[in-house]
Image (cartoon, helix red, strand yellow):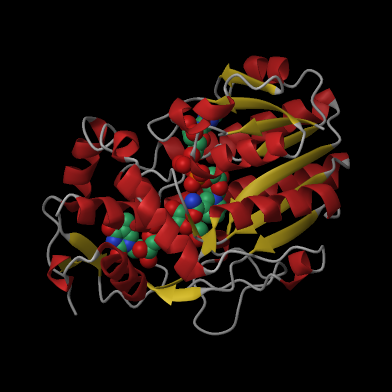
């Protein structure tokens, strides 16, 4: 297949691009190269005969129309993706995650692509105290990020209902692995430990996330792309619930660092307490997560230990300004 992957210079997108090429597909990677987009993430495939890069914004209809020529399937991963940034300054989130999604959906419809995969998130469901979210549950997003992502999902499903366009939506759980920008919990804590810096645990650290390795997430997107039914949503859940404190303790264990690095800081506003996904629908398409959490996290820690040249340049400039705004005068947790 000839795939147009958006956001392919980001964390999950770059893993997906590598997997797609390894499976014999042709890939056009359309990426705006925001702070989170890193050409180094796809450097090893840059000269692959089946790979092409287009530097563009998914909200630019002309650029998108040009990139869509000859494409069979669109996989839309481009997004502003970080909850804390959406709380500090939400402006960019609807521009990409809502408006950009509408633009690329409509250009894909006009181009007559065979399928459009909208890559979304379990955060659109909001928080769940007990049980697990199913695809039929309503969306109740808590943050500006998840509200924008929910807007993207709803548009994708509306394009199916209104125009009969072949659309599938995937909703993935918290993803970890190599090349994740060090603003998210796991890469932030691993790189802070390696720098001897504190680990800012929000609130009591008892919030629960359902972790999935990036390769399992990408394989789940492929299952929905290849075998999903048009107009359907598929949860891509790891079935691997952990409290944030447990994840933090594992990172300390794998790096041999002290618990003294833990700092309990003021909680995230509107913080969802627990995410948990029922992924049986995707299991029915023959997909199961394969990476054991302990093994995957240990390998991820080792990757950051071995790739300082990847993350040290990131942790300067714009990142330092973000870090200061996010954590600088944050008070202690009210526990
Ligand atoms: P990321 O922040 O690492 O990468 C996002 C990529 O999108 C970057 O390369 C960036 O340059 C690009 N981009 C941003 N705005 C763009 C625009 N307007 N036009 C073109 N490119 C643009 O994100 P990620 O963590 O890899 O997430 C990828 C997708 O998966 C997102 O849609 C996100 O909502 C979803 N998702 C992420 C997770 C997770 O835990 N990381 C879990 C579930 C779903
Ligand atoms: O659930 C899927 C979502 O997972 C994706 O849609 C998002 O793109 C991705 O960023 C992620 O969102 P979270 O908000 O769950 O991820 P984050 O890594 O920011 O935080 C994970 C948990 O760790 C959350 O409960 C907040 C907490 N946390 C995070 C940071 C950055 C801390 O306690 N301290 C921190 O410094």
In the picture provided, is 124 more to the left or to the right than 312?
A: right
Please identify the quadrant where the N terminus is shown. Answer: top right
- Name the image quarter holding residue 307: top left
Q: Position of residue 134 (x, y in %)?
A: 68, 72
**Image quadrant where one finds the C terminus:** bottom left
Which residue is located at x 75 percent, y 64 percent? 282
Whether residue 270 is visible to the viewer of this picture, yes or no, is no
Q: Nearer the viewer, residue 230 or 160?
A: 230
Q: Is residue 301 above or below residue 292?
A: above
Q: Quadrant of ligand 2?
A: bottom left
Residue shown at 51%/71% (left/top)?
A: 275
Q: Position of residue 149 (x, y in %)?
A: 56, 49
- Rendered location of residue 319, percent (x, y): 25, 37
Determine which quarter of the picture holds residue 31: top right
The foreground one among 35 and 193 is: 193
Q: From the viewer's perspective, is residue 169 above or below residue 273? A: above
Residue name at image x 19 percent, y 38 percent: 320
Lateral position of residue 248 relative to residue 160, left or right: left
Residue that appears at 18% across and 52% down: 327
Q: Residue furthest bottom?
A: 130
């Amino acid at each position: 297949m000839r795939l147009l992957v958006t956001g392919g210079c980001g964390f999950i997108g770059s893993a997906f691009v590598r997997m797609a090429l390894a499976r014999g597909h042709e890939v056009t990677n359309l990426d705006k190269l925001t702070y989170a987009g890193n050409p180094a993430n796809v450097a090893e495939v840059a000269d692959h005969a089946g790979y092409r890069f287009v530097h563009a914004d998914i909200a630019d209809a002309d650029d998108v129309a040009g990139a869509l020529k000859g494409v069979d399937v669109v996989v839309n991963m481009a997004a502003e993706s970080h909850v804390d940034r959406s709380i500090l300054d939400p402006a960019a989130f609807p521009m990409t995650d809502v408006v950009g999604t509408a633009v690329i959906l409509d250009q894909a419809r006009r181009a007559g692509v065979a399928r459009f995969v909208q890559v979304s998130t379990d955060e659109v469901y909001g928080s769940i105290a007990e049980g697990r979210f199913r695809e039929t549950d309503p969306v109740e997003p808590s943050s500006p990020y998840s509200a924008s992502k929910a807007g993207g999902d709803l548009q994708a499903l509306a394009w199916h209902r209104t125009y009969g366009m072949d659309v599938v939506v995937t909703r993935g759980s918290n993803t970890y692995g190599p090349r994740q920008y060090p603003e998210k919990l796991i890469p932030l804590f691993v790189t802070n430990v390696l720098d001897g810096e504190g680990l800012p645990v929000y609130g009591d650290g008892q919030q629960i996330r359902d972790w999935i390795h990036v390769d399992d997430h990408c394989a789940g997107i492929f299952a929905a792309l290849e075998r999903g039914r048009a107009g359907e949503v598929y949860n891509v859940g790891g079935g691997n619930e952990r409290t944030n404190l447990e994840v933090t303790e594992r990172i300390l264990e794998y790096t041999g660092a002290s618990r003294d690095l833990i700092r309990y800081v003021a909680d995230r506003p509107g913080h969802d307490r627990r995410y948990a996904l029922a992924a049986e629908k995707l299991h029915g398409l023959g997909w199961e997560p394969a990476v054991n959490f302990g093994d995957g996290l240990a390998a991820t820690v080792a990757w950051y230990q071995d790739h300082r040249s990847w993350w040290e340049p990131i942790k300067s400039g714009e990142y330092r300004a973000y870090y200061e705004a996010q954590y600088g005068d944050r008070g202690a947790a009210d526990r």
